[in-house]
Amino acid sequence: MMSAEQYLLYQHSVDNRATYELTWILSAIMLASKHIATYVRRVDLTDVALASGVVNVHGETVQKMDEIADKMLIESLGMNADVAVISSEENETPVILRESGGKYIVFFDPLDGSSNTNVGVPVGTIFSIMEKNGDQKKNIDDIVLLKGDRQLAAGYILYGSSTVLVYSMGNGVHMFTLDPNVGDYLLSKENMIMPESSKIYSINEGNAHSFSEGTKRYLDWVKSDEAGPYSSRYIGSLVADFHRTLIKGGIFLYPATAKSPEGKLRLMYEANPMAFLAEQAGGLAINGEKRILDIQPQSLHQRVPLIVGSKKEVEKVQKFL
């Protein structure tokens, strides 16, 4: 019965990557997530599942829950003197909290899958922590546009049948479950390893007509007698689909389409954190051509294709591509 805070302090004593600064930042994210979880559980009793009437930088309708989650994370992280810059999927530009002092940047998608809250689908908060590149006198793009391999920590909170925190500081992937009776995250799985292979694939096949020929060949293969065939599982919420893949193995694909030739998922807020976790758990994450964590971002809200999951399953897709 070890709490997340106790575990983080223990990690600090045995691993120099688990610094006190990162521990405090994760603590701030956990605090915000407990409040977000409360709203998500009461979504049908309030109007927070409705659209806010605002359209974000991506051209997407912002849900009221997006705004609530974004505000809670910014307020909680803003109290931390070690956080210099916050960058949220919902805001066009980064929020500079401190002109001097503080050395970390926190990237986050406040509520992935928020449009599904009114139909009971699990949703989640995704986060990534990096050390800023230089001081605030530099151009803001030079400070925040960092490759995914610069991540010091990443993770997500899944709001589903239970509220679950999954994170890594580069020392394995660990899972904590929020116990509502004590109001704390408790260690539920340590050093998670993604199965090396599993016959589960996850993709929105409604877009199959505009996938690349390599992706189409792969989808034909997974349904063939030669392959097994595979089972199809697609929830439509990245956090939920990735969480299943982390535990049961398989592969999640969100490839480029004719409508979205650069991909749909955001590199900094979604692909990088999930790729970091996948690799820490023994899996792989690519954009179809290269490792996700090797991509140098050109813009804050850059989109990428994402293929992530069990090592052998991703390698199979690579052969078709």
Image (tube, rainbow, N blue to C red):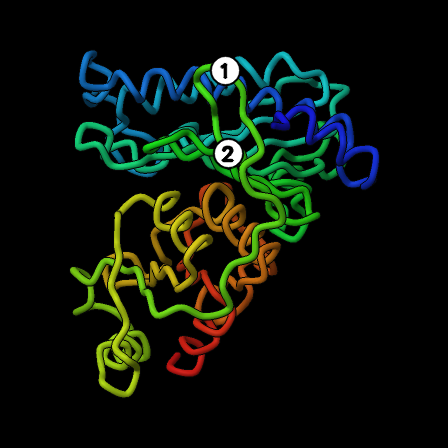
Quarter of the figure with the C terminus? bottom left
Q: What residue type is labelled 1?
A: Gly
Q: Which residue lies at the image location 28% right of the left edge and 27% below the top edge?
A: 62
Displayed quadrant of residue 319:
bottom left
Q: Can residue 83 be seen in this view?
A: no
Say the numbered circle drawn on residue 16: none
Mark 2 element type: strand
Q: Residues within 10 Å of mark 1 (few under 14, many from 20)?
A: few
Q: Which residue lies at the image location 56% right of the left edge and 57% below the top edge?
A: 193
Residue that label 2 marks:
165
Quarter of the figure with the N terminus? top right
Q: Is residue 85 left or right of 64 when viewed as pictured?
A: right
> Could you say which is closer to the camera, residue 235 or residue 112?
235
199 over 204 or under it: above or below: below
Q: Position of residue 307 (x, y in %)?
A: 42, 63
Q: What residue type is labelled 2?
A: Leu
Q: Position of residue 142 (x, y in %)?
A: 66, 41
Q: Nearer the viewer, mark 1 or mark 2?
A: 1
Q: Is residue 130 visible?
A: yes
Q: Which residue lies at the image location 56% right of the left edge and 28% below the top edge?
A: 186
Q: Position of residue 144 (x, y in %)?
A: 62, 38
> Could you say which is closer to the camera, residue 18 or residue 143?
18
Please, which residue is most extreme toward the front here?
A: 1
State the count of labels.
Answer: 2
Q: Which residue lies at the image location 43% right of the left edge and 15% below the top edge?
A: 35
Q: Earlier in the sequence, mark 1 or mark 2?
A: 2
Say the numbered circle drawn on residue 183: 1
Q: Distance between the residues labelled 1 and 2?
A: 13 Å
155 over 68 or under it: above or below: below
